[in-house]
Amino acid sequence: MMMHEEQSAFESMLARSLPLSCAGPPPRPRTHFEDLPNDLWFCIMCYLPYTDLLQLRLVCKRWRDLVNRPYFMSRGKVIVTERNLHAMKQHVERGDSNIRFDCVELRNLRHSEELEQFLRLVGPEVGHLQVRHAPVFRTLDGTMPNLKILAIATTSFMDELLLQPVEGINLRQFVHLHSFECDGVSLDSSQKLLMLQQLRHVENKVRLRHLQFEYRTNSEAALLEVLSDHAGSLEYLDIFFSCSPDRLTGKWRVVFEKLQRVHTLKLSGNCHHDLLEAIVEALPAATPLRHLDLTGMLSLTNDLLMLIACKWKSTLRVLDLMFCVQLDGRCVQALQHLSGSLKVLTMAYCRELTGRGLLDGLALKPNYTLQELHLEEVCFIDEESICTLVERLPNLRRLGLDNCRHAVTNRTLAAIFQHQTKLQELNIDYCVRVTDAGLVGFGPKRYPISNLRGLRALNMRGCHNLTNRVLMDALRLPELRSLSVGYCNRFEAEGIAAFTINCPAVEKLCLASCHQVDDRAVESILQNLRRLRSLNVSNCPKITLHSVYQIARHGENLLEFTACGIDGLDSSAVKLILQRERPQLKQVLL
């Protein structure tokens, strides 16, 4: 210690004695980890398991506030199944459990005394409940007094083993309920109607903020009454029209005129033009609508889109128009109205759109607001227009151009790699004109894909002209998390081995129908991609049981493994090995 102090003193004296011309630049101050911005902390926290996040909450108030964000807290969902119910109940009964049960999913369960006892133990903690393939509604009675969010997904009111109907759920007991979702799959229409009627203010005094429900003819009156009762509090409304409503739209107009607080509106299914027009006209312009999803709304016209753009041009941030096939080049004016506010735009499968129309509507001048653009299957975009478009949209984070075969070429990729340096996700599935040169670097200035240093997801399924050269020389992406290259039949073990070295952060990899992929490739993947969570090698005929043994040896972080359509793979042997060696695997598809 004394020698170290003397050396430090000597160095300080020597530095003071040096002339200014000899002294180097002053050392740059080092940033303390507590001074890192929140965005960077979010990236770091995404890698931490839930138990570590709970410990991180104890460090300081700032970290507690960051961890308490809904994104992180939702990762703590407890999934209860027949396989783990007994062990989980014993764990809770011991009294030393550190598991939080504020978010619970009941999956593949039937009514039993053990389940009832378990729910009585943990029920008071549950604030968010999801029921999936579990007709256990009678078991919920009186066990969850603090429930706030209830989601019923793909659950029948019929006990499949006893072939007997089960009792419905009593929603009146959940006095704190503010969110109700019911996707309608396999549910008896009379039971659904009963649940909807229980949400009336005459039956229940809750104030719903979030409602997702399926429209059926027999439930129209009850649905409109519920919407009217909760018009003052509803902020999120999602209606799926499984059948076409009546042409008389007066009642719908009256109800939607009352919705003053809705910020997210999703309408899908069989909704005719008269009703859609009535809803858009009735919804007040003062409503703070930020997210409008009209996926599959075949009745949406250019004039209706113009009305939407005029009413909410200052508030609308997310607009989803997938499969709105009546839209064409005449919707340019509506897009121009929204170009200053929209952050996310989806116009996939709107096949009448042209590249010139999109350019005039979204980027007549540089547009710094738009961050996500999805144009999958828009066939009539030309190369010149898409190159200009990506140049005038410099802040894109996600870009979807799947099957835009005429627009996506090597020249298009060069423009993307030059101007879209903030891109995090790029989808170019089935863009068959793309070759190795487009990814390695095309044109006189040769901009490679490695320019996209922050790229996290890359989908190139069906780009069958790509070879090992792309894997060896182009894909040098340190932030890449997900790669899908299915049906790229020229990729071989050597290229995949190089890719695993150049992209070490990959967590999800799909090599389905890459016929040259063999056991050597899988071995490289498992040895080098230490963060890998999901691997898909379906229809890769060269895969044998040796790859399964490699998973048993090196796949400690693997959670999903898919190997369908491989004739030489004994599925029973695979399941036996993985159940014994890798019980943590959540999904194995063979």
Image (spheres, rainbow, N blue to C red):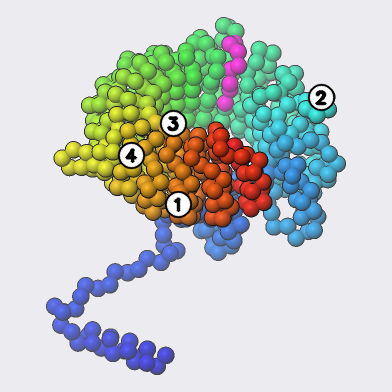
CA–CA distance in space, label 2 to label 3: 44 Å
Which residue is situated farthest in the right direction here?
A: 113
Q: Quadrant of the N terminus?
A: bottom left
- With respect to residue 353, does 149 lie above or below? below
**Residue visible at 74% across and 44% down?**
83
Amino acid type, label 1: Ser
Task: Give the CA separation, mark 3 to mark 1.
Answer: 41 Å
Q: Is residue 432 left or right of residue 165?
A: left
Q: What residue lies at 37% left-to-right and 48% top-to-bottom?
A: 494
- Magenta span contains residue 241: yes
Nearest-to-viewer mark from 2 and 4? 4
Say how many tags the image has.
4
Residue drawn where x is 29% and y is 47% of the image:
473
Q: Earlier in the sequence, mark 4 or mark 1?
A: 4
Region rendered in magenta: 238-245
Q: Which residue is mark 3?
A: 318
Q: Disc 3 marks which amino acid?
A: Val
Q: Secondary structure at mark 1?
A: helix
**Is the Cβ of the residue at disc 4 closer than 8 Å to that at disc 1?**
no
Quadrant of residue 418 within the rendered picture:
top left
Q: Looking at the image, which residue sits at the far left?
A: 21
Circle 2 is placed at which residue position?
A: 163
Q: Amino acid at mark 4?
A: Thr
Q: Which residue is mark 1?
A: 524
Q: Are marks 3 and 1 in contact (CB under 8 Å)?
A: no
Q: Earlier in the sequence, mark 4 or mark 3?
A: 3
Q: Which residue is mark 4?
A: 467
Query: How much space separates mark 1 and mark 2, taking CA atoms?
Result: 49 Å
Residue 515 lies, in percent from the top left, at 44, 36
